[in-house]
Image (cartoon, rainbow, N blue to C red):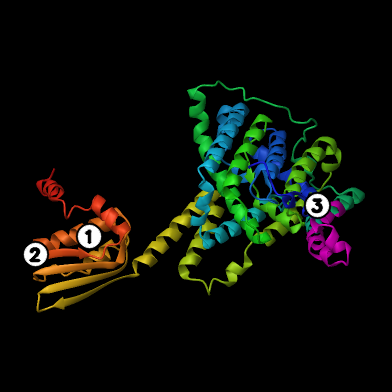
Amino acid sequence: MLLLSKKQDWFGNTRGDIMAGLVVALALIPEAIAFSIIAGVDPKVGLYASFCIAVVTAIVGGRPGMISAATGAMVLLMVTLVKDHGLQYLLATTLLTGVLQIVAGYLRLGSLMRFVSRSVVTGFVNALAILIFIAQLPELTNVTWHVYAMTASGLGIIYLFPYLPVIGKSIPSPLVCIVVLTGIALMLKLDIRTVGDMGQLPDTLPVFLWPDVPFNLRTLEIILPYAVPLAMVGLLESLMTATIVDDLTDTESDKNRECKGQGIANIGAGLLGGMAGCAMIGQSVINIKSGGRGRLSTLLAGSFLLIMVVFLGDWIKQIPMAALVAVMIMVSIGTFSWGSVRDLKAHPLSSNVVMIMTVMVVVWTHNLALGVFVGVLLASLFFANKISHYMLVESEFDEENDVRTYRIVGQVFFSSADKFIAAFDFKEAVEKVVIDLSHAHFWDITAVSSLDKVVLKLRRQGADVELIGLNEASSTIIDSFAIHDKPDEIEKIMGGH
């Protein structure tokens, strides 16, 4: 059942989940505000969305301990929609995005993650780490030395506090960093940028909102071109993040349930006046590093977020951005796969190219989906090229019976079809040619077409051609699409019809 989760998922790590949820909530606030500003909407749209998506995915999502909220990858796809059509159409698009994601879950599209190679995942992770770091640079440019000092102090606290006996392991160091730097900024009355400078925090709880748009085909024409890429990017980032959290926690997750959970969460966000969102690798890493493992941490992250911005807004506004920048730099450093740099010499060139190209495309375009698509495409091409080399054609001639036998070993498909054709000698005059396919497999219509070419060319030279040893799968595709034993089809081709 979608709504049922193991007790262990909720209460197996209560203390760690509570502390981690508090840290994540603090880290979510400035990002949700920033994303709202980028999208061109009121900050509460991002904050309400982050609250709703985190709480709902905690209950119905497929990956315990993963944080979902409003994200930069999704926001970039909304800018034009908001500019051209306004907030109400954004809310309608958010609802449709959720519906599409639920459909994807029932179609089991989460299983497609098995086609994403380790090199693509590594490239995705490294690109996100770089983007997270780049996103902090505006807070570190054209500022006073106090900001650099505070950020450096924050990093010092984050990395050194865990070494303190007893207390170092009990309290997440990012939380200590935020509290200490806020205290220092207030005591010294430092004139530095704070969370309050990012935008106005909401002072009321979210209410149910049905998008005020016409319910007709014209509305669908407007929102569908935005909802489809939002659904795709949201699922892609969520599933990739789930895979990364799987690795960090050495546990497994239900990817198809995650698709449905993300969809339900986005529908909820749209009905509460929020924008579409998805899993956040940065906040998910903060959660894991702070000790969060279960669904409780995600639920509390969303709940604490709403409580803080609505009821403790005056205090939250005073948190210096330098403290949150330090936390995000820690996330960037912790997210980047430093081992992938060391392994460049040891790994195959093709794997390195896939990883580096994924990083380059994501960083250059800020489009996670495009980067992963390029990585998967390159990995597929390299794989097809590699497999095409594992095809061997052996030949022997029986002079007594004037029979030439070709033995095919390996995979015949679009990438190896030309090599298959080139292995035959069409100028040799023999009475009979036997093509032994006992150790071969034909995968596609390109392979079948290459077999047709070989058989027809040999017959034109006067040879009697016999195919032997076809396995059942190859025989099925050849019977369906081959023409060399179908006189009517050959006649059509020869007659130009």
In this rendering, the answer to whether 314 lies above or below 441 is above
Q: CA distance from mark 1 to mark 3?
A: 64 Å
Segment colored magenta: 152-180
Query: How many residues crowd around disc 3 within 10 Å: few (fewer than 14), some, or many (20 or more)?
Result: some
Q: Is residue 475 magenta?
A: no
Of 428 and 308, nearer the camera is 428
Q: Earlier in the sequence, mark 3 or mark 2?
A: 3
Check disc 2 and report the residue beneath it: 461
Q: Going 61% across and 69% down the picture, which residue do you hit?
A: 339
Dot 3 corresponds to which residue?
14
Q: Which circle's residue, 1 or 2, is located before the other in the chain?
A: 1
Q: How much space separates mark 3 and mark 2, taking CA atoms?
A: 79 Å
Which is the main secondary structure of the residues drawn in magenta? helix
Name the disc covering residue 451, or none.
1
Magenta stretch: includes residue 178: yes
> Does residue 5 sit above or below 146 in this rendering?
above
Say what secondary structure mark 1 lies in: helix
Q: Three-letter amino acid code at disc 3?
A: Thr
Q: Residue lying furthest right in this view?
A: 187
